[in-house]
Image (cartoon, rainbow, N blue to C red):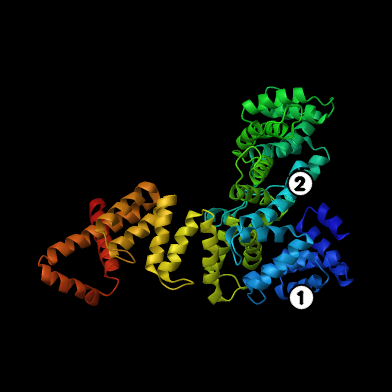
Amino acid sequence: MGIKILQQSKSQKQKAEAYMFFAKAADMGNLKAMEKMADALLFGNFGMQNITAAIQLYESLAKEGSYKAQNALGFLSSYGIGMEYNQAKALIYYTFGSAGGSMMSQMILGYRYLSGINVLQNCEVALNHYKKVADYIADKLEKSEGIPVEKVRLTERPENLSSNSEILDWDIYQYYKFLAERGDVQIQVSLGQLHLIGRKGLDQDYYKALYYFLKAAKAGSANAMAFIGKGNAIGLHGLGLLYFYGKGVPVNYAEALKYFQKAAEKGWPNAQFQLGFMYYSGSGVWKDYKLAFKYFYLASQSGQPLAIYYLAEMYATGTGVLRSCRTAVELYKGVCELGHWAEKFLTAYFAYKDGDIDSSLVQYALLAEMGYEVAQSNSAFILESKKAKIFEKEKMYPMALLLWNRAAIQGNAFARVKIGDYHYYGYGTKKDYQTAATHYSIAADKYHSAQAMFNLAYMYEHGLGIAKDIHLARRLYDMAAQTSPDAHIPVFFALVKLETVHLFQDILFFNQFTMRWKWMKLDNTLGPYWDLFVIGLIVTVLIFLLRNCYG
């Protein structure tokens, strides 16, 4: 009854009612209901977060062989949330979880072996774990199941934290689906458009777009007919599917091939995938792995998930292409991240917006453990704000540093700068200017980060962790200004300060011997932050001059 209510619910109130039934069933010893209740207590569904109670339930479920409980206990052990921080124990829990059938545990182990987290790095073992999950996801995708979600990056979207207008509420989406299935033509066209262009938190999904447009067109909607017009790429692809699967017409691979080729020429990724699949499987054509690879690759450039999956298969087996374990794993990982567990990105985001920081953090932290880079940076962002209550304050910076590091390894430039900051200021680690400079250099050289260039320039200017080099400092300040318009004002003040100090040094200390002695005395006279004093002086003079100009 609880599951039935949950599936048909259109509001939070109805969902809460479903959990009343789960609670009753859990009290009667139903394992599935106990799992539902434990998850609700862990993730804080409907404001009912109680991690201690969740752990008690998970521990009793684990004794009964629940793989979901094994995975949850592994996650809690890996972060030290409500339990002892113990990576060895976490690994054991994940191993049991994956053996029992937990897709999440498989993904976590895949990520750990790929990155060498508390295990020896092993691409082949990572491949084995990721492939199992990717096979499961691909099967769902072929049945057009699962709903893609937007992964909101908290570090880049502060303006959205007060409004969710850009994201379609999950309850509303379910309600729209319900109305569309009941025959509401206007809703069918609207959902078709949302899936077609990927808006309101939904990624592009041409199958779903075509599904809703065809429904509406069948009911006589002129708008829907326009979207699937015969000369249109979607329509051509749709006709190809009808002939390929024999829906309403006899199966005709030659006709399917013709329509897929026309749609593929117009750049339609799903048609490119279908062509690839025909050549890969030999459906109505001779098997041709080179052509299959070509079309899968073209479709994958637009993010077609099944094309990415089949490319991974080809790289994993060396079919039609030189075998590459690393490439296969990266591709499988991308497919795995489309799983239904990605729904937590939305619930975590809304919990954060509503001020439920602990609920948001637990959800992001689980996704981070599964290898989602966005979740890693979001978890680190929340941790360093020190608003969470589920972590002891002294553990927040070290854990945030660990997560920023994982996000940086996956190519997040902002995270790379953050690691530099943590070493510069000594957050969660010892102060280490040299390491800070190394990370700023990576962010500047590899990702052209203006912030990293500015920070590095400051370090060269003052000889912090690296040899003092005024010329290089000037160049880096200029590069920061050229890279980002936001850097213009801070760079202007930094350069004015640098040149003023340089001039100050030349005028007051022209005597080489007295210069050395007096310069050393400057720190003692004005304090260690004398350069900030100089900046303040410059700003005051500039304000005075501007007021006189416009007064």
Rendered position, 427 above or below 140: below
User: Circle 2 sits in a helix, a strand or a loop, which is it?
Assistant: helix
Disc 1 residue type (three-letter): Gln
Q: Which label sits in the foreground, 1 or 2?
A: 2
Q: Is residue 149 left or right of residue 21?
A: left
Q: Quadrant of residue 33?
A: bottom right
Q: Is residue 502 visible?
A: yes
Residue at x 32%, y 64% (from the top left corner): 466
- Residue 141, given in percent of the width and then of the height, sits at 74, 44
For residue 26, the mark is: none
Rendered position, 216 above or below 397: above
N-terminal of the two: label 1 or label 2?
1
Disc 2 residue type (three-letter): Lys
State which quarter of the image contains the N terminus: bottom right
- Tell me the CA gap for discs 1 and 2: 33 Å
- Residue 29, given in percent of the width and then of the height, sits at 88, 71
Q: Is residue 216 left or right of residue 540?
A: right
Q: Is residue 436 left or right of residue 267?
A: left
Badge 1 crowding class, 10 Å Cα cut-off, few under 14, some 14 to 19, many 20 or more, is few
Determine whether label 1 and label 2 are within 8 Å by CB: no
User: Circle 1 sits in a helix, a strand or a loop, which is it?
Assistant: helix
Rendered position, 214 above or below 101: above
Question: What residue is pinned by disc 1?
Answer: 56
Q: Residue furthest left?
A: 511
- Residue closer to the observer: 70 or 282: 282
Badge 2 crowding class, 10 Å Cα cut-off, few under 14, some 14 to 19, many 20 or more, is some
- Residue closer to the observer: 127 or 486: 127
Residue at x 54%, y 66% (from the top left corner): 402
Question: What residue is pinned by disc 2?
Answer: 140
